[in-house]
Image (cartoon, helix red, strand yellow):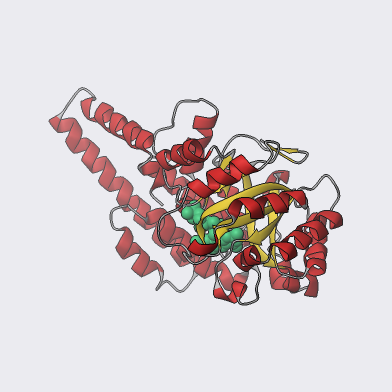
C-alpha cells in the first residue's frame, strides 16, 4: 500500500489510542507485525505552546521504524505549526484527528466535530499539507458522520483528499455512537468507492479476530485494517494478520511462555521509557492486559493495583506466570499419563492451531 510517496508493508495498522499507544506499546506491536503505528492524539495548541508533557509524546519508533504523529485541533495555523514540529521529531506521516468523540475534544469543536464543518476541516488539511515537505504525507482519521441523521463519510473524505489528504481511515461509527453499537461497514465501503484508487482507505472498528479482519476487508474493499483495543495485551493479532497478508501459514496461538516473554519485554520497555510518575501505573496496566484470560488473572489484577513499587509489580507478574506455567505443565503431565505416546501434546497443538485459525486466542485482548 502506498501513502503518498511512502510504501507501507503488509500488516494491520495500530490505531492511535490516548494513554495507550506510547513507545513501549507501539514497539511491541511493531515487533509483532504492525505495519505502521500512531501516537495518541496530541493537541496542536499544547504542542505549539511547548507543553513538555505533550511534546515528549511525539516519540519516534525504535530502530528508525516509521511512525505517525496524530494531531488534534481546529485552528489551521496551529495545526500547521504542530505538524512541522512532528516532522522535526521524525514523523513519517502526520495524521489529523477528525474522529475523536470525547466531549473534552468535541466541546473544543475539534476531533469528530470537524465532520460538521467540512470547510474548516479542508482548510486544516490544506494548511498542514503546505507546512510539510512533500516527503511527508498528511492523512486523516474520521468517523462515518456525526449522527445517524448526518452520515457524510464519503463526501467528507473526498473533500479532505481534494485538500491534500493521502490516506483516509474510517472508524465505522458515528460520533453519537461513541464506542457502542455496531460498527457499520457500509459507509466504509462507500468511502472506498468514492475515493480515487491511489488513495488508500483504512477500515477500523471492532477488529478483534482474524475473522473480523477478513470481514472488514471483504465487505468494505478497504486497503488496510486498523486495530485498536484488541491489540492491548494481544500483539499476536498483528502477527496473524501479517501472515494472512503474506500468504504464510497462520501462526499458532502464543504459548504461555511466549505470553510471559512478551509481557516481560513490554514491562521492561515501560520501566525504561515511562516517566517516573507514570511507571507504576503503566506497569500495573501492562500486567493487567497480558493476564486477561489466564487462570488467576482477575485476582492478580486486584493485587497488582495494590503493589506500591514498579519492581514489586514485575515480581508479582513473574510469580503469576510461574504459577500459570506450573499449572500448564501439570495439566500436560496428566494428559501424558491418560493419553501416552504424545497424543496429548498433539491434541494440544491441534487445539492451539484451531484457536489461531478462528482467531480466538490471537484476540484474547
Ligand atoms: C482508550 C482509547 C483511546 C483512543 N484515543 C484515540 C486517539 O488518540 N486518536 C484517535 O484518532 N482515536 C482514538 N481512539 C479511537 C481508536 O483509534 C479506534 O478508532 C477505536 O478504538 C475503534 O477501533 P477498535 O475497535 O479497533 O478499538 C481511542 C480509542 C480508545 C479505546
Can you see residue 256?
Answer: yes
The residue positioned 20% from the left and 22% from the top of the image is 341
Picture quadrant of ligand 1: bottom right
Q: Quadrant of residue 32?
A: top right
Side of 125 relative to 206 (left or right): right
Near-viewer residue (113 or 313)? 113
The residue positioned 71% from the left and 60% from the top of the image is 58
Side of 179 relative to 10 (left or right): left
Residue 276 location in percent, x, y? 61, 71
Residue 144 location in percent, x, y? 55, 56
Residue 224 location in percent, x, y? 58, 40
The residue positioned 36% from the left and 43% from the top of the image is 361
The residue positioned 61% from the left and 77% from the top of the image is 107
Side of 56 relative to 85 (left or right): left
Near-viewer residue (16 or 105)? 105
Q: Quadrant of the N terminus?
A: top right
Residue 87 location in percent, x, y? 80, 55
Q: Is residue 348 above or below residue 273?
A: above
Amino acid at each position: 500500500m502506498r501513502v503518498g510517496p511512502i510504501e507501507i508493508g503488509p500488516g494491520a495498522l495500530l490505531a492511535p489510542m490516548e494513554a495507550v499507544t506510547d513507545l513501549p506499546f507501539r514497539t511491541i506491536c511493531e515487533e509483532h507485525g504492525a505495519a505502521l503505528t500512531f501516537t495518541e492524539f496530541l493537541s496542536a495548541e499544547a504542542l505549539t505552546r511547548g507543553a513538555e508533557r505533550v511534546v515528549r509524546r511525539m516519540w519516534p519508533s525504535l530502530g528508525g521504524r516509521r511512525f505517525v504523529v496524530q494531531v488534534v485541533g481546529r485552528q489551521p495555523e496551529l495545526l500547521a505549526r504542530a505538524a512541522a514540529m512532528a516532522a522535526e521529531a521524525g514523523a513519517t506521516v502526520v495524521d489529523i484527528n477528525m474522529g475523536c468523540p470525547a466531549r473534552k475534544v468535541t466541546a473544543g469543536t475539534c476531533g469528530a466535530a470537524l465532520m460538521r464543518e467540512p470547510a474548516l476541516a479542508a482548510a486544516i488539511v490544506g494548511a498542514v499539507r503546505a507546512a510539510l515537505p512533500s516527503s511527508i504525507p498528511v492523512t486523516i482519521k474520521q468517523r462515518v458522520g456525526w449522527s445517524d441523521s448526518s452520515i457524510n463519510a464519503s463526501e467528507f473524505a473526498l473533500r479532505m483528499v481534494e485538500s491534500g489528504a493521502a490516506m483516509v481511515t474510517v472508524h465505522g461509527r458515528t460520533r453519537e455512537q461513541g464506542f457502542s453499537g455496531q460498527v457499520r461497514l457500509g459507509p466504509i465501503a462507500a468511502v472506498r468507492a468514492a475515493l480515487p484508487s491511489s488513495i488508500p482507505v483504512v477500515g477500523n472498528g471492532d477488529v478483534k479476530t482474524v475473522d473480523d479482519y477478513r470481514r472488514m476487508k471483504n465487505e468494505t474493499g478497504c486497503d488496510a485494517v486498523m486495530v485498536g483495543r484488541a491489540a492491548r495485551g494481544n500483539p499476536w493479532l498483528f502477527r496473524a494478520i501479517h501472515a494472512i497478508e503474506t500468504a504464510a501459514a497462520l501462526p499458532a496461538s502464543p504459548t504461555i511462555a511466549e505470553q510471559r516473554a512478551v509481557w516481560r519485554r513490554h514491562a521492561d520497555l515501560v520501566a525504561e521509557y515511562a516517566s517516573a510518575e507514570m511507571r507504576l501505573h503503566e506497569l500495573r496496566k501492562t500486567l493487567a492486559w497480558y493476564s486477561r484470560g489466564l487462570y488467576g488473572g482477575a485476582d492478580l489484577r486486584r493485587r497488582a493495583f495494590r503493589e506500591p513499587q514498579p519492581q514489586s509489580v514485575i515480581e508479582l507478574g513473574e510469580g503469576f506466570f510461574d504459577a500459570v506455567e506450573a499449572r500448564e505443565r501439570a495439566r500436560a503431565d496428566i494428559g501424558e499419563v491418560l493419553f501416552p505416546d504424545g497424543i496429548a501434546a498433539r491434541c494440544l497443538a491441534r487445539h492451539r492451531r484451531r484457536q489461531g485459525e478462528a482467531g480466538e486466542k490471537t484476540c484474547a485482548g
